[in-house]
Each structure stands twice: as structure tokens, then as C-alpha cells.
Image: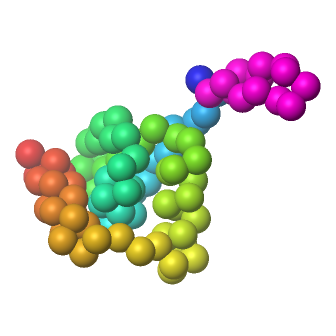
Amino acid sequence: MQTITEPQGLVIKQDIPNKTTKDLYLAAAMQTEGCRFLGLDKTDPKRMVFSFAGGELADRVEREWYADILVVSASRYAACLRSSKSMIHS
């Protein structure tokens, strides 16, 4: 639940949907950028789903990923990719 304060002083509470992806590489990028990892759904062993907390950070990473403009640390990305692969195979 996110709280937004409007200029008039009104407080609005919004439910932010979680981000999910089947894309291993996007999942590693989201982890690299600090998106909060929620879990991995292994129900379908051919199509595992990574879940992250939604919000502005997750939206930005996803938007920049698909626009091909996301810039991350290569070594940190490699570490997150290894970690994501490890989760899949455990």
C-alpha cells in the first residue's frame, strides 16, 4: 500500500500491484537495481515466474529495460543473474 499526499493535503492510499516476469534477464536487472524480490513461482517448471514488489523503481526498470536504455553495473548484473539461475535450479 502506497500513501500519496496531494497538494490540497488529502492523503490517498493506493494498492501497488507486484511486478512479475518470466524473463530471467529482466529479473536479474530488477535485482541489480534494488527491486525487492518477493519469490519465484515454480508451479510450471518450463515457465517460472519471478515476483518483485511493485512501485516506481520496478516500473522504471521495466520501462528502461524494454526501451533498451537501462544502464547497470556489469559485475553486479552478472552476480544477480547467477543468483537467479541458482534459484531456478534449486
Magenta span: chief secondary structure: strand
Q: Which residue is nearer to you in this view: 25 or 11? A: 11
Residue 71 in view in this figure: yes
* Residue 74 percent coordinates (x, y): 24, 75
Q: Quadrant of residue 11?
A: top right
Report whether 22 appears left or right of 80.
right
Going by the picture, which residue comes out furthest to the bottom? 68
Position above or below: 37 against 71:
above
* Residue 44 percent coordinates (x, y): 30, 46
Q: How many marks?
A: 0
Q: Residue at x 28, y 71 (%)?
A: 73
Residue 41 in view in this figure: no
Q: Quadrant of the C terminus?
A: top left
Report whether 66 appears left or right of 78.
right
Residue 90 shown in magenta: no
Q: Residue at x 51, y 78 (%)?
A: 69
Q: Residue at x 21, y 59 (%)?
A: 80
Query: What are the residue bounds of the magenta stretch?
Result: 2-14
Report whether 69 appears left or right of 2.
left
* Residue 8 percent coordinates (x, y): 90, 25
Position above or below: 31 against 14:
below
* Residue 21 percent coordinates (x, y): 43, 54
Position above or below: 85 against 9:
below
Q: Which residue is nearer to you in this view: 88 or 5? A: 5
Q: Residue at x 84, y 21 (%)?
A: 9
Q: Quadrant of the N terminus?
A: top right
How did the renderer colour the structure? rainbow
Residue 13 shown in magenta: yes
